Amino acid sequence: METQTLRLFVLAAEMLNISAAGRALGMAPAVASTRIAKLERFLGAELLHRSTRKVSLSLEGQDFLPYAREMIAQEEAALAVLGKGQTSISGRLRFTAPSTFAQIYIAPLLPAFMDAYPDLMLDLHFSDAQFDLIEGSYDLALRNSVLEDSSLTARKLADDKRILCASPEYLARFRTPVDPSDLASHRMIAFQDLDPRGLVAEDGSIADFNPKSCAHALVLNDGQTQKQATLSGAGISICSLWLVHDELRSGQLVQVLPKFEIAQKPALWLIYPKSNVVSAKVRVFIDFLTKHIGKNPAWTKSA
């Protein structure tokens, strides 16, 4: 199998367009179609379903895609060892991340990354709803949950400390809790779920905290809306520190029960398909995010 044909297949699978993938690699549409057909005959499987209207990835194509990427990465690594690798990073990088975090921390960094790697096309999908990494053909994803899929690899970007906070106006109206048991009489705002949590005191004792037992609960699936609702006095919020650290510093929000910590210690993870070799485009983006976000997270400076 020719590596250039594998590159064509990977790009066509990402773009769902064989002709466009071929043009991106300097091939005429007819040549690109012929190469894909030749690869399919060699493998004895249809990798891409074609119709007059669209191209879609077959089940066999989905299974073969990570191996095609692996073979390309292996060749790049081998050439790099011999000093014959590409001097510039190119291709298409598909990356997905929570929209709220991306708006605050990733979007401002994009001009610098684009200047550093002008030949690399970024295909970014930002949403607080999580996408399947393999099914969506993503090269890299940012997640804040524990990795359970054994076909994926994770690299920690930063801690994702959660706190309880509220607006001064809300606390003036409903009184400031001084003990975890006081939370039962309050309004609670949470992101996506109201799962029970433990609150750890300074002496190591743990108090059970069940948001569902509070006087009123509000569940939101958008981080910016959660912050705005908290600022508006809708209740006590279970927030990531990275979301509200500026408001805590300015006094717009106040940490509730500061002598207690939420028992879970979540983190932000960069997740990518498991491979013996990480592709150059994924490696440089991971290094870039680690340098500009993970090395000295902005939210820890005011923690």
Image: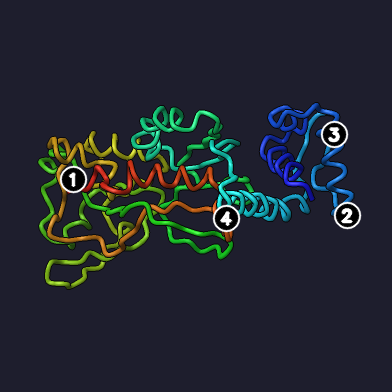
Q: Which residue is mark 2?
A: 44
Q: Quadrant of residue 70?
A: bottom right
279 or 242, which lies in front? 279
Q: Name the residue rendered at 85%, 34% in the picture.
A: 51
Element type at mark 2: loop
- Disc 2 vs disc 3: which is toward the camera? 2
* Mark 4 vs mark 2, CA separation in Å: 25 Å
> Residue 59: image x %, image y %?
76, 52
Disc 1: CA contacts within 10 A as few (<14), some (14-19) or many (>=20): few
> Residue 231: image x %, image y %?
23, 35
Q: Earlier in the sequence, mark 2 or mark 3?
A: 2
* Mark 1 vs mark 3, CA separation in Å: 54 Å
> Residue 87: image x %, image y %?
54, 38
**Amino acid bearing label 4:** Pro
Q: Which residue is mark 1?
A: 301
Q: Which residue is mark 4?
A: 273
Q: Name the residue rendered at 57%, 55% in the picture.
A: 273
* Mark 2 vs mark 3, CA separation in Å: 20 Å
* Mark 3 vs mark 4, CA separation in Å: 29 Å
- Disc 3 vs disc 4: which is toward the camera? 4
Q: Earlier in the sequence, mark 4 or mark 2?
A: 2
Disc 2: CA contacts within 10 A as few (<14), some (14-19) or many (>=20): few
* Mark 4 vs mark 1, CA separation in Å: 32 Å
**Amino acid bearing label 3:** Ser
Q: Earlier in the sequence, mark 1 or mark 3?
A: 3
Q: Which residue is mark 3?
A: 51
Element type at mark 4: strand
